[in-house]
Image (spheres, grey):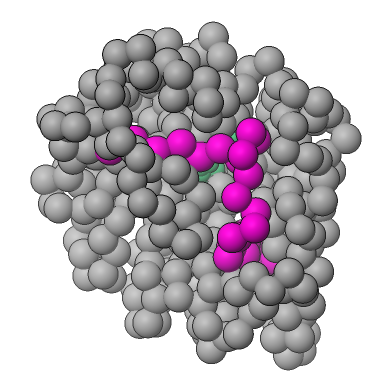
């Protein structure tokens, strides 16, 4: 079992399959700085991912999420999904949705039942502005395709002031006749993403805005949930808020991360990383490294800032860009 010094049991592993993406969302990809893309030889191979995962699973990991970059652009994405499907874990994926139509069968075969798709706007032109690519039609069609195939679909919306906060109510309306679970994510600071506290719309502000038009009820949360869930009566779908900046949920955190170059991070905001892939390639036992990484986990937010986002100085945070971590 992987337990940290604050008695938090870690049983959820998020694996970045690549630090490359076919979209170019500014809040995720560094602006005006070179993207640290790793060459194939520095990247975990399908076989290495499988080997590393087998160690985590023996230590009690029950849930694995594949992410990136965009996990589905990796040429061996299907092989990786198939390999991981043999483990007794809940296998899930976070994707921008562009290639989902090519993976429905693979997901079904691998027992993937829940898919997170990122979509920050319901407007085609704005989608182009945010992602710098013309994929709105494909993504929205693929969300509908997932729903048609009975997947549990969560739609991730990063809310940014004066970018898409005017669409919060539209997203709620969107859940009326669609069994989709919209998750509003507070904008988080990462290297190169031009974060500013002025661009954050907090959990409280989102709820206040929604209450101007809708009644809603709070749903019960599971123990390790990062999102606070709500239901508008008579809507098929639900909405939730991920309040990392204004009300973090570190005390119940059960998550660990592997970057595509095989570095383990014990927190999205941790500055320290442990080279699991390097150790594996040297023939070392990786378990002690994994245990130490978990044990070294800080109490909250990687020890880098406090929950008061109004005074957070993003320039002092020492981390990778989101695309290089794997969200
Ligand atoms: N390419 C996939 C996708 O688009 O979902 C997976 C990787 S992406 C980094 C994972 C999630 O992180 C997405 O839902 C994205 O919206 C979210 N994300 C990226 N940068 C963020 C930021 N600065 N603040 C909050 N969420 C962010």
Q: Is residue 299 left or right of residue 94?
A: right
Q: Position of residue 171 (x, y in %)?
A: 31, 23
* Picture quadrant of residue 172: top left
Could you say which is closer to the camera, residue 278 or residue 312? 312
Report the magenta residues as a range: 238-264
Q: Residue at x 68, y 74 (%)?
A: 7
Q: Residue at x 80, y 40 (%)?
A: 305
Q: Residue at x 75, y 23 (%)?
A: 310
Is 147 left or right of 53, judged from the image as shown? left
In this rendering, would 71 be left or right of 188? left
Look at 60% across and 60% down and name the residue there: 253
**Up-down relation of residue 194 to residue 323 (above or below):** above
For the residue pair 62 and 276, the one nearer the viewer reads as 62
Q: Is residue 118 above or below residue 292?
A: above
Which quadrant holds the N terminus? bottom right
Judge whether residue 30 can be spotted in this image: no
Q: Is residue 263 magenta?
A: yes
């Amino acid at each position: 079992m992987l337990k940290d010094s604050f008695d938090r049991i870690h049983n959820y592993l998020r694996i970045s399959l690549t630090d490359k993406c076919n979209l170019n969302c500014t809040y995720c990809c560094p602006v005006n700085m070179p993207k640290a893309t790793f060459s194939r030889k520095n990247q975990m191979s399908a076989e290495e991912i499988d080997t590393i995962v087998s160690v985590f699973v023996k230590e009690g990991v029950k849930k694995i999420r594949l992410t990136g970059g965009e996990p589905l652009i990796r040429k061996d994405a299907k092989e990786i999904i198939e390999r991981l499907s043999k483990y007794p874990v809940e296998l899930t994926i976070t994707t921008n949705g562009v290639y989902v139509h090519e993976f429905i069968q693979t997901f079904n075969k691998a027992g993937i039942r829940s898919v997170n798709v990122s979509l920050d706007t319901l407007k085609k032109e704005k989608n182009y502005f945010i992602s710098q690519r013309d994929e709105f039609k494909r993504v929205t069609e693929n969300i509908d395709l997932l729903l048609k195939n009975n997947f549990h679909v969560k739609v991730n919306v990063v809310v940014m002031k004066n970018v898409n906060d005017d669409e919060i109510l539209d997203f709620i309306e969107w859940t009326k006749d669609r069994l989709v679970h919209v998750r509003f994510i507070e904008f988080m600071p990462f290297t190169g993403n031009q974060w500013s506290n002025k661009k954050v719309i907090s959990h409280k502000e989102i709820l206040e805005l929604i209450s101007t038009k809708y009644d809603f009820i709070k749903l019960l949360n599971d123990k390790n949930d990062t999102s606070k869930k709500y239901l508008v009566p008579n809507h098929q779908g639900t909405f939730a808020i991920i309040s990392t900046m204004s009300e973090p949920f570190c005390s119940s955190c059960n998550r660990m991360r592997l970057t595509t170059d095989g570095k383990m991070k014990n927190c999205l905001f941790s500055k320290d990383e442990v080279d699991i892939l390097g150790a594996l390639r040297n023939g070392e036992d990786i378990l002690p490294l994994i245990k130490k990484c978990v044990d070294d986990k800080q109490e909250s937010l990687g020890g880098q800032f406090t929950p008061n986002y109004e005074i957070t100085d993003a320039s002092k945070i020492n981390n990778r860009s989101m695309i290089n971590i794997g969200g």
